[in-house]
Every structure is written in structure tokens, then in C-alpha cells.
Image: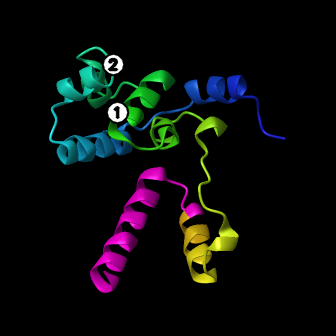
Amino acid sequence: MEKPIAKARREAFHSPYDPDLLIKRIKDLLQKHNESYREASLRAGLDHQAIRRIFAGQRPQMHICILLADHFGVNPNEFLQLAGWPALKAFDVRSIETDSLSPEAVEVAVALQKIPAPGKRKEVADAILILVKKYFE
């Protein structure tokens, strides 16, 4: 049985936090969206210094991760996990049934899912997509 979210959150709160992966991901998204951290903070519905505090190494609260992820159009669980929080089932979206995929596609998806770091998993997935687009589109 999974831990209740309140207990998982409490444990995460008291665990060490390494801000580097979240900072790198946000900087990549800021560059991709051609925004300053101030613009992105405000457009996400946060105060103008929210992203600056993350860049300074402060762990963002869960709701800040969710609002930023919504603003950048990424799965909130990615930001939650990068910030050291537990993933929420509400954001665990399964839009494609595996029986509609080829065995090779399922194998790649399963291998990707086994990569524990969300940032690294995203990098590998992006690299795979680049290769597919380059050779098959």
C-alpha cells in the first residue's frame, strides 16, 4: 500500500533538497519560452520573485511547482519530483493504451520509465524524439 500523501509530503519536507535539476529545467523552459524569470512568475500567477527564490536554492512549495508546470505546459509531477516532493496521482495521466502500441514502443516506454530522475528521463526522451524526427519525418 502506498503512503498517504500527507505522510509522503512530510517526509519529503524533512529530506535533503538538491535544487540543481529543477533550476536547470526551469532555465531551459525560460529560454524555450523566451521569458524572464519575472515574466514567467507573474504569468504563472505567482509573485514576481518566485522563480528567483528557486534559483537561490529555496525548495518551492508544492502549489508553486504545480502552477509553474501549468504555465510551462509540462506535467506537474515532473516539477514536484525535481523539487523533492512526492508525485500526485491526479497528474499521473495515461493517454495511450499499451495494447495500441507496437512491442518496440512499449519496450522503449518501459525503459524510459525506469530512469529514476525526471530531468534525466526528459533528456533521454527528447533525444529519442530528435532521432525519430531526423530519420523518419
In the picture, the disc for residue 109 is none
Q: Horizontally, is 1 left or right of 70 in the view?
A: right
Is residue 121 covered in magenta?
yes
Q: Are marks 2 and 1 in contact (CB under 8 Å)?
A: yes
The residue beneath circle 1 is 71
Within 10 angstroms of label 1, few (less than 14), some, or many (20 or more) residues? some
Indicate the position of residue 123 as horizontal and vertical percent values.
37, 61
| Picture quadrant of residue 99 | bottom right
Q: Residue at x 48, y 38 (%)?
A: 76
Is residue 21 covered in magenta?
no
Q: Horizontally, is 126 left or right of 62 in the view?
A: left
Instruction: Report helix, strand or loop for mark 2.
Output: loop
Observer-nearest of 67 and 27: 67
Q: Residue at x 41, y 27 (%)?
A: 67
From this view, report whether residue 56 is shown above or below residue 32.
Answer: above
Which badge, 2 or 1, is on the more N-terminal residue? 2
**The furthest residue to the right:** 1
Q: Amino acid at mark 1?
A: His
Indicate the position of residue 100 as horizontal and vertical percent values.
64, 72
Instruction: Report helix, strand or loop for mark 1.
Output: helix
Q: Amino acid at mark 2?
A: Gly
**The furthest residue to the bottom:** 135
Observer-nearest of 47 and 119: 47
Q: Residue at x 36, y 78 (%)?
A: 132
Within 10 angstroms of label 2, few (less than 14), some, or many (20 or more) residues? few
The residue beneath circle 2 is 45
Q: Residue at x 55, y 33 (%)?
A: 85
Q: Horizontally, is 6 left or right of 60 in the view?
A: right
What segment is highlighted magenta in the picture? 113-137
